[in-house]
Each structure stands twice: as C-alpha cells, then as structure tokens.
Image (cartoon, rainbow, N blue to C red):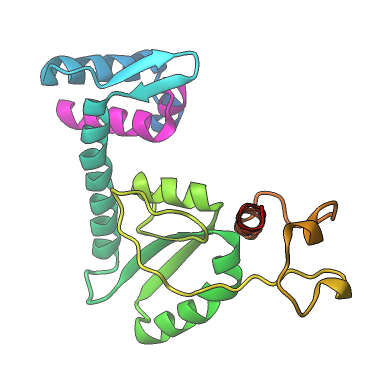
Amino acid sequence: MRLEARLRAFAAIARCGSLSRAAEELYVSQPAVSKHLALLEAELGRTLMTRGRAGATLTPAGELLAEFVLRAEALLANASRALTADAEAQTGVLLIAASDTPATYLLPELVARFGQRHPGVALDLQKATSAEAVEQLRAHRVELAVVAGVTVPPELEGEPLADDEIVLIGPPALGGRRLRRRDIEGLTWIALAGSEARAAVDAARHELERDTG
C-alpha cells in the first residue's frame, strides 16, 4: 500500500506539474506529497523531478516512469467502469478529446453511428484546443484525441480521418486566377484567433510569398 501511495502521488505531480496542485487533487498536504516523492526516488535510486519557479519538471527517468504509471491509472479506471457496468460485452465509457472544428463538424455524425453500433458504450467528448487534446492523450486522461492541423508526436499513433478544404473569401477582383504575392500584400484577413484554420491560412500565405518571391 505504501508503494501505491507513492505512485499515486507521483502520477498526480506528473499530471499537474506542481506539488501543491497534486496535493489539492489528492486531498493531502504538500509535505506529504513531497515525502512520497522522496521515498519513491530513494527506492528507485533515480531523480524523477526537478523543482523550480515554474513548477515540477520531470527528468528523463521521471518521464519514463510517468508513461507507465499514468497508463496503469487509465487501465484501472477503465476496469472500474467495466465492473460497474457488470462487465458486460462492449460496455463502458470511451473518453475523447477533440478540437473545435472536428468536434463541431466531423464527430457528431460519427458519434451517432458509433452509438447505434455500440449502445452499451457511452462517449465522453471533451472540447479542447488541439494542443490540449494531444496533452490529455499523452497523460492518459483520454483514450482518443481528434484534432486538426497538428503533427502527431512520435510516441503517439495517428490516423487521418478526413481532408479539410479551406476557402478564402475576398474581393471579386481576386477570384478566378492564381494569387500572387502582390495580390495579397496590404490586405486585411479575418480569422478566428488561435484556430487551426488560421494557422493553415498563415502557412499557405507564407508559402505563396516564398514561391512568388
């Protein structure tokens, strides 16, 4: 049980990036969390975290351990949900994080079809930015992430779901021909701040400027 308490404390720190926030999550004191971490490091003979003004940062050894511990927590949570549902076939909860565009336009139809095929599985869909969704997946807080405009990290597996076409709306004078740099210079473009669509448009504009010199 002592080892379990140390691993739970370590998992909370890895998720929260802070000993104080980990203590709040576990409803214990911060000194207790610090003690669990120190005992775990002593038992393993490795430094798992470094502390600074920005919070707690995992060492390479800590990142490796966190991968196993967070995965184990996710498996235990799934097992608990399955047992609560009487361990019937194809029952439980599937946790998904999705960025705004796929959550709004792509997933509703897929979720409806999934629900018809697997009525015993509840879908818990959480909206997030693409970066947040990927981080939730890496931390094993969700089991799937559906994002747009993000390069899949090497430690995760990705599968393309759909191609997205972005259409720029501008004055009639720009229509019907290939745009050149002088066509877009000095124009004001409006896009949602921080969106994947804006990032894609900015990348296309930079590519256009490079190609046309």
Q: Residue drawn at (16%, 28%), measured in percent from left and top?
A: 3
Quarter residue 36 falls in: top left
Q: Position of residue 184 (x, y in %)?
A: 79, 58
> Image point 17% across, 18% down: which residue?
46
> Camera-side residue: 69 or 63?
63
Q: Which residues are magenta?
A: 1-22
Q: Is residue 10 magenta?
A: yes
Residue drawn at 34 percent across, 77 percent down:
120
Q: Can residue 201 be seen at all in this image of the molecule?
A: yes
Camera-nearest residue between 168 and 89: 168
Quarter where residue 41 is shown: top left
Chief SS of the magenta region: helix
Would residue 195 be found to the left or right of residue 110 on screen? right
The quadrant the N terminus occupies is: top left
Task: Tell me: residue 41, above or below residue 13.
Answer: above
In the image, taking residue 201 as reference, residue 60 lies left or right, namely left
Q: Position of residue 74 (x, y in %)?
A: 28, 50
Q: Is residue 213 left or right of residue 12?
A: right
